[in-house]
Image (cartoon, helix red, strand yellow):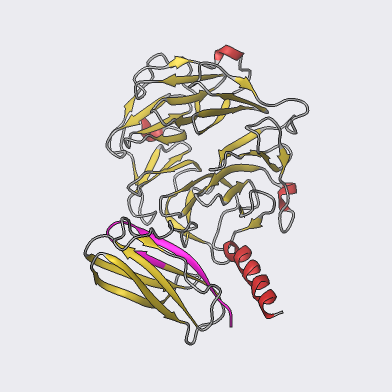
């Protein structure tokens, strides 16, 4: 009976983690609604606004600076994409595509053969091809945006291409209630929605794919999120929430972290999260002062950023992802942070971690609102695997976060104290 209660408590606490003190407001950019967000491998955040161009933050949103390019400065930036070399592409409504090769400091307009300069969506595939969804067409660049070729007129698009998503070489685009897929870099396309597919008479506002290949779309006609597990052949409406609010609000943005947890931004009910592949949803509005979100991005540390219609970007207080498992062997080949054991625990638990070179390492514990409750390690460590003991003296039952910071990475995990 006691074990059953522990498991039930574990499930309930894990399910409710995102509803508790989740968000903190950043200091900007406050220059028109935030239409698009992107983060690069260095942790820089780029926010595309409605009428004020692009803003950049180098400190996870604490400060923002407007890009000073004279043309881009006053543009309506609808989409941002970043390739593996760190080149940034910005799509605009009426000025085509811009590119930056220096983390956003300078920009060049790249519209050669781009006949339609109303760009609604951008994406880059794993071989560096850039795809631009415009009003009634799709364009592809194979040379980093220097030249563009139309690849969407092959099937007679009748609507603006609002979303592009890429997974394992397959390219998915949405235009109104239509979804198309290409498996040969845009040379040929397959129509993926039919009368019996489960999606019809909708307006697709967002499109995202998880690591298992499941596709999720947001809809602003039937107030729902749909899921496909067969590459878009069939769709199931995933409109369940803990308070049923998806039944009355448009879903405008979707993003998925490396744990396959799904975040959805809505028109009037704020933010939602699903931790079970979209089957159920929890509203996560604690800390928000806006309820209309059109863009979401997740950085390498697992922090979620949500761009609001008010012009403010909100950041999750903690990482939403966990680190990789510890590798075997006496000499570690990567810096790792393992799940504590036991978990749930009372009164103490062990945390194992590895470092791969001599430097200062810190291991700290925080509560769910970001208060530091313990410093387990803060000293120079030689390469090796270590175990730290955490004792929960004078702490209340609940979910706690422990973070390992080293020169290689910042890694975070959750643990549960049950007294």
Q: Is residue 226 magenta?
A: no
Vertical position of residue 410 compared to residue 308: above or below: below
Q: Residue at x 53, y 49 (%)?
A: 310
Answer yes or no: is residue 152 visible: yes
Nearest the viewer among 29 and 282 is 282
Direction right: furthest residue: 196
The range drawn in magenta is 403-419
Nearest the viewer among 9 and 386 is 386
79 relative to 204 in the view: left or right: left
Kindly indicate the quadrant of the structure image that contains residue 362. Answer: bottom left
Vertical position of residue 363 compared to residue 316: above or below: below
Q: Quadrant of the N terminus?
A: bottom right
48 relative to 181 in the view: left or right: left
Q: Is residue 414 magenta?
A: yes
Image position, residue 56 (x, y; %): 36, 45
Image position, residue 11 (x, y; %): 64, 67
Q: Residue at x 37, y 75 (%)?
A: 388
Q: Residue at x 73, y 51 (%)?
A: 240
267 relative to 194 in the view: left or right: left
Direction front: furthest residue: 329
Q: Residue at x 57, y 54 (%)?
A: 290
Vertical position of residue 266 compared to residue 384: above or below: above
Q: How many marks?
A: 0
284 relative to 108 in the view: left or right: right
Answer yes or no: is residue 70 visible: no
């Amino acid at each position: 009976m006691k074990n059953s209660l522990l498991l039930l408590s574990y499930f309930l606490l894990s399910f409710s983690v995102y509803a508790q003190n989740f968000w903190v407001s950043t200091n900007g950019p406050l220059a028109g609604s935030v239409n698009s967000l992107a983060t690069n491998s260095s942790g820089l955040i780029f926010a595309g606004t409605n009428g004020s161009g692009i803003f950049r933050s180098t400190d996870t949103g604490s400060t923002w600076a407007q890009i000073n390019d004279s043309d881009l400065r006053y543009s309506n930036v609808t989409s941002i994409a970043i390739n593996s070399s760190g080149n940034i592409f910005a799509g605009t409504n009426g000025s085509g595509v811009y590119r930056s090769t220096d983390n956003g400091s300078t920009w060049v307009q790249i519209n050669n053969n781009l006949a339609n300069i109303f760009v609604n969506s951008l994406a880059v595939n794993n071989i560096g091809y850039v795809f631009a969804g415009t009003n009634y067409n799709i364009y592809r660049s194979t040379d980093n945006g220097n030249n563009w070729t139309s690849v969407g007129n092959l099937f007679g698009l009748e609507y603006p291409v609002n979303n592009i998503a890429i997974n394992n070489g397959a390219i998915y685009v949405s235009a109104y209630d239509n979804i198309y897929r290409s498996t040969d870099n845009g040379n040929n396309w397959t129509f993926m929605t039919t009368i019996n597919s489960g999606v019809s008479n909708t307006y697709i506002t967002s499109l995202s794919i998880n690591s298992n290949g499941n596709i999720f779309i947001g809809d602003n006609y039937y107030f729902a999120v749909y899921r496909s597990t067969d590459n878009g052949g069939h769709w199931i409406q995933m409109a369940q929430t803990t308070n049923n609010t998806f039944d009355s609000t448009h879903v405008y943005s979707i993003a998925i972290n490396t744990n396959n947890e799904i975040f959805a931004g809505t028109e009037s009910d704020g933010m939602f999260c699903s931790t079970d592949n979209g089957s159920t949803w929890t509203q996560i509005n604690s800390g928000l002062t806006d309820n209309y979100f059109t863009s979401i991005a997740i950085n390498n540390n697992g922090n979620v950023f949500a761009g609001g219609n008010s012009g403010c970007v909100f950041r999750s207080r903690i990482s939403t992802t966990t680190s990789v498992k510890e590798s075997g062997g006496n000499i570690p080949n990567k810096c790792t942070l393992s799940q504590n054991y036991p978990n749930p625990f009372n009164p103490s638990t062990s945390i194992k971690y590895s470092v791969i070179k001599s430097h200062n390492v810190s291991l700290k514990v925080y509560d769910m609102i970001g208060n530091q409750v313990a410093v387990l390690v803060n000293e120079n460590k030689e390469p090796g695997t270590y175990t730290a003991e955490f004792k929960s003296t004078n702490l209340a039952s609940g979910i706690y976060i422990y973070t390992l910071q080293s020169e290689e990475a910042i890694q975070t995990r959750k643990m549960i104290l049950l007294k």
